[in-house]
Amino acid sequence: MQWRGAVAGLFALLAACGPAAAFDRAAIAGWSCAGASGMTEAANALIFGVASASKEDAAWAAALAGAALDRTLKCGGAAPAIETPQGPVDAVTLQPGAAGDGSAPLLSLKNRPLFETARAAATLFVGATPGERSAALGALERRAASLPTDIFERAADAETDAGLKERILGAGQAALLNSPDMTKRVAAIERIAATPDRRALTRIAALKADPAYGKDPAFKAAVDAGVGSIERWLAVSNALNALYNGLSFASILFMASAGLAIIFGLMGVINLAQGEFIMLGAYVTYAVQEAMRAIAPGALDWYLIVAIPVVFAVTAGIGVALEATLVRRLYTRPLMTLLATWAVSLLIVNLVRVAVGTQNLQFVTPSYITGGRLVMGDFIVTWNRLFAIVFAAVTLGLTWFVLKRTPLGLNIRAVTQNRAMAGCVGIATRRVDMMAFGLGSGLAGLAGLALCPIYSVNPQMGSNFIVDSFMVVVLGGVGTLAGAVIASLGVGQINVLIEPLYGAVAAKVIVLLMIIVFLQFRPEGLYAVKGRRK
Amino acid sequence: MTAAIGPKRSLIARATDDRIVAGVALALAATAAALLAGGLSGYRVNTIGQFACFALLALALDLIWGYAGILSLGHGLFFAIGGYVVGMHLLEQSVAVTGITPDIVQFMGWTALPGWWAPLESFPVALAAALASSFAVAFAFGWASFRSRVSGVYFAIITQALVYVAMLLMFRNDTGFGGNNGMTGFQVVFGLPIQDPAVTKGLALASVLALLAALVGCRLLMIGRFGRLLVATRDDEVRLRSLGYETLRLKLAVWCLSAVLAALAGLLYVPQVGIINPRLLSPELSIEIAVWCAIGGRGRLAGAIIGAVLVNAIKFALSASLPELWPFVLSGLVIVVALIFPNGLLDLGRWRPTLWSRADALQPTDATP
Amino acid sequence: MTVAVLVEGLTVEFGSFRAIDDLSLAVDYGEVRAVIGPNGAGKTTLLDVISGVSRAKSGRVLFDEKIDLTRASEAAIARSGVRRKFQKPSVFEALSVRDNVEIGLGGARGADAGDRVAAMLETVGLADDADRLAGDLAHGQKQWLEIAMVVVSEPKVLMLDEPVAGLTDEETERTSALVRRLRTPGRAIVVVEHDMNFVETIADRVTVLHEGRTLFEGSMARARADARVVDVYLGR
């Protein structure tokens, strides 16, 4: 077996010279016709050279190895030739015009697998379909240990199919991990540990059962270090995942509760139907989707964007109607308003239940928010959640702008601070109430739009958000955007961070307890405007 | 009347109120007599018992909302505390008398009921435990909230969060109270089989009498000094504090009293329906209690009873024939009452269509946020 | 003679707004002290701190040279004998006039409680309205009822925040007579008021506040002559 090492070394050297290193086609074709030992040499040359070969050379290698296996390689003529349905071709150039006489060289039992490997290795690079390449990979995986180390990596680099690419990389790592050469194994462990994900962890952790783990302290150290490092990174990426999910949850919460906080600050009223405005927002989004499916199926993907103004207009309109017919008549009785808005929420839920049904709505996920990007470890930035986050950020910006830079915002702030005085200087306070109620309801509707791609949408969904939204208002204080932002982030993150540790229920319990404790110190919430009472 | 001060308590509104209270008390006494006389069907008797429990629950809420201006949207919590404790008592008793292993043991994966339930086999212990635990929870939560001067809408939504969290907790199996299934399969009440008509009658009678006692007792308490101080707290808490009263104590006292009455209602209710599960803790039910009070009229105790009986009568009638109509009827009732009868249906006699906005203005503001 | 209310280096802030800035003040027993000044000068805030409604950032308020009021609860302050009438008439509208005054007695109810309440109602001229609901009273009557509520417990320090705001001349006249009658050697009375004629008829000394500080302290006649007081408040 010395020759194999020598040849391997030689070709490894050749491979290291760069990708341009070409096959010595003539020599290899010659060896193929030079008896069993020559054929062994030829097959090895193909196997070890294919990784660094050009596309044409790889295709040629596939053809030659195939010919040897299919007994269409003809030796005995002036030059080795390959028989094809279109007539014989030169075995070196694959050009027609060769003399197709001679006999096929006998493939020994030892050489057959070598040529099979050679063909598979070449096919892995030049196979026409992912199916062919995948089959070739299957053949190679069985002999992975005897293959040159870089073959899988280069194949993976060239691979266009994402799934297959992953498999090729995995096969390469497996090959190295099981290599008889201990330094290679250790290097492979380090390499795998460098891209920490759950699969890498399984793969390295499996080596603890390897006999070498007990015998070789260096190997054991490498495995332990690899597992440790991956676990650390996985912990980090898990935390990032949780933070990311928390951020998207907080974004929805913010949109749901900003309106509550503005209305509460302005009118001292909590709208218990806020959750149902979220639900309505989601249902209007669905209606827009269905309308576009009917009218402009080609542009269906853009329904989420088209729905934004529609959702805001519809939910804000319903909010204005609710304020004008019900809330304003109860403004001296905030507790009765709680009950009245609860009745409205009951009414809305049951109307939707009767009109649309209780099942979850099916949403098309637009292509621009499908999938995500693997950032590190298991941490994936999914586009649907990013959509919610960016959407909330833009909403925050616009709401801030409305409150701070528009006449309506100025009026809202004025009435919030001193209703009587604002009335005295000519602000139509009731009109401001109505507009603010519309704004708050519209924000809730937008929350419903943003959550369509993430959470399930049904008539009862509002209740999932409403209690958390209350907590945000209590925590953040009334009438301030900043309070709503900070409190949403706090409640959202605490919920999502505690959930994996102790469960969703514990998260809610802890949030509530924390808020009760917090109120002991800041009864008015985070951002209360302090002032004298009378 | 224990009102030592103010002998000339002949204000017209109070006299009317007194007549209504007297009327309701009389009706309760008549109901109790009818139950004793017998002749009512088992279903009717059971319904009367359930209504009495709901009315007691509403009365408990009216104490704090109507008099002290504290709206709880989580009173189902105390109702359920009473219910769960009596549920444990009934299970223990059923096992002790019949020896049959209840279902809860099976679906909780236990081999027997938890050892710490054993003392609850005795009814006096269970009664004490229900009242004490509801008192303890109410005291802790009330103290923390009132001390930091959480009130009005804030308090209402925090109580709602409280009952919501309690519901989530009880839905979990490892909280240890039967999870989603709750407790059911009670066999024995006071040593008698639960199907025995005497049990149904006894429970209904106990509920009606408890309600009657609560009505009279709370009425006396409320027209006395304590009640007047509560009204003062409701209308201007800062004013009352600056007159030297620790309103924290007043509020805490009435809050705990209300919680204990609610637990008593739950304790009487569960044996009559034969089941307790976390759905009793749903925020919707707790809001519904407030709706009963609002519909019947707050701050007059009798109104809460009338509201609870009226709303539940409609609910029971509809759930037999048109259950899907109920939510619409309920929301319609609430909106109508909120807009047109700010003081509840007891305003019906005084209502003039053109005056509704004026009635609104006359309504004492229920709290400042 | 002990000082009834001693304010030392008091500072109160609401957010970044400094309502009272390092204020010091002493009110003696037997004195009627008027605190005047433009809106936002910190007059009501001062009463808020003395009665425990607002908390001071620094400084202290001693009652009877013994009790630090900045550390006591509102109820404890009231029970110790410091009582206050609010700017906005604060009576319990759902209770009868008699009940209101009776609540004002607080825990200090003896066998003569009924008599004291009746006498108090007589003093403020509401004896005939004792069984009416407080909410049904006229504005001026509410002001007197509130004064009755805080006076019935015989406070050592009585604070009146704008007792004649919104009253007719005749009602104002009656109120000033009432305040003069309430003045006893064992009681300090602090009045915040904008009505200068009223202040002149009742006050022994006036303190003029401006932007949370003392601008002037002395008799009303000298205040009228003080250039700075005229400048910031009284006008020419």
Image (cartoon, rainbow, N blue to C red):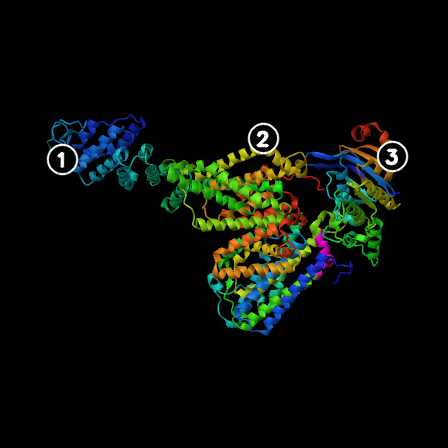
Q: Main secondary structure of the magenta part?
A: helix
Q: Are marks 3 and 1 on the same chain?
A: no
**Quadrant location of the C terminus of chain A in the rendered image:** top right
Which of the chains bears the disc numbered 3? C
Query: What is the secondary structure assignment of the residue under circle 3?
Result: loop
Percent of width and height locating residue A352: 47, 48
The span picked out in magenta is B220-232
Write down the quadrant of residue C14 in the picture. top right
**A369 to B151, vertically: above or below:** above
Which of the chains bears the disc numbered 1? A
> On the image, numbered disc 3 is attached to which residue?
C219
Query: What is the secondary structure assignment of the residue under circle 2?
Result: helix
Contact flag, marks 2 and 1 (Cβ < 8 Å):
no
Q: Is C26 placed left or right of B210 in the picture?
A: right
**Front of the two marks 3 and 1:** 3
Q: Amino acid at mark 3?
A: Ser
Contact flag, marks 2 and 3 (Cβ < 8 Å):
no
The residue closer to the viewer here, A292 or A230, is A292
Q: Are marks 2 and 3 on the same chain?
A: no
Q: Residue at x 67, y 56 (%)?
A: B254
- Return the mark for residue A405: 2
> On the image, numbered disc 1 is attached to which residue?
A104
Q: Residues within 10 Å of mark 3 (few under 14, many from 20)?
A: some
Give how far apart the Cα atoms at labels 2 and 1 are.
87 Å
Q: Magenta span has A463?
A: no
Query: What is the secondary structure assignment of the residue under circle 1?
Result: loop
Give how far apart the Cα atoms at labels 2 and 3 are.
50 Å
Q: Is residue B160 visible?
A: yes
Percent of width and height locating residue A6: 27, 32
Q: Amino acid at mark 2?
A: Arg
**Quadrant location of the N terminus of chain A in the rendered image:** top left
Contact flag, marks 3 and 1 (Cβ < 8 Å):
no
